[in-house]
Amino acid sequence: KILMEDYSGHTCSNCPNAARELDALIDIYSKKIVPITIHVGKTYARPYHISQAPKYQYDFRTETGESWNNLFQITNLGLPKGMINRIGVPNSTHGAEVTNWNSIVQSVASDEPDFGITNSSDINGNAGSVDVNIKVLNDIQGDFNLVLCLTEDSIINWQKDGQSNIEYYQHNHVLRTVIYDDKLSNEGTLADGTVIENNF
């Protein structure tokens, strides 16, 4: 899987180009891509003042998205920007230009994963909790985090696209909340085949 974080904003006129590039990569790589669109910052993601209603009243931002933006300083690099598997963090090159996304994805597409959710029974949820069972796929050492996000597709709302204000724009892969973002329960040396069970 390839994690693609698209940092965006509803008044960012170039951000729909990033969304189109992300969709093109999904068309090519299908379920190998894990897309998250994260609306951040006070410039391009902030809702308009109520006096300008109905345009841009919706607030797509999340607390965790803002926290990640503060950590990775993405809006300081200019939107749209993306991170692919968080390559380059914490170097200043981690915020990738949209024109580079395809080549970066190609460079990591054949990488072997160290962890997996091996079948549909390894992640289950209901209204009150979610179980996530992770299988270690190689003998590895180190400290690892688990990040469990909820995203939503097909949110119809305003978006700038070039010079146009699109009232019925379809926002996809939108970060809605982060259920967990912390250390895995097991750390240090992890043996191939180990299953790490988590309940949130």
Image (cartoon, helix red, strand yellow):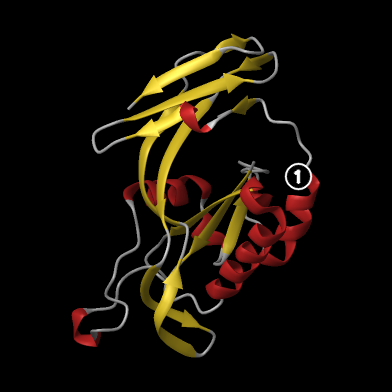
Q: Quadrant of the N terminus?
A: top right
Q: Quadrant of residue 21?
A: bottom right
Query: Which residue, as the protein is rendered here, is positioned at the far left?
Result: 51
Q: Quadrant of residue 167?
A: bottom left
Q: Quadrant of the C terminus?
A: top left
Q: Nearer the viewer, residue 89 or 38?
A: 38
Left or right of 163, for residue 190: right
Residue position marked by numbered label 1 in the rendering: 109
At a point 32% along the width and 78% down the height, the residue shown is 56
How many numbered callouts?
A: 1
Left or right of 144, for residue 150: left
- In this rendering, the answer to whether 174 lies above or below 72 is below
The secondary structure type at the circle numbered 1 is loop
- x and y percentages locating residue 76 in the rendered image: 52, 60
Query: Which residue, as the protein is rendered here, is positioned at the far bottom?
Result: 163
At a point 25% along the width and 84% down the height, the residue shown is 54
Q: Quadrant of residue 157?
A: bottom left
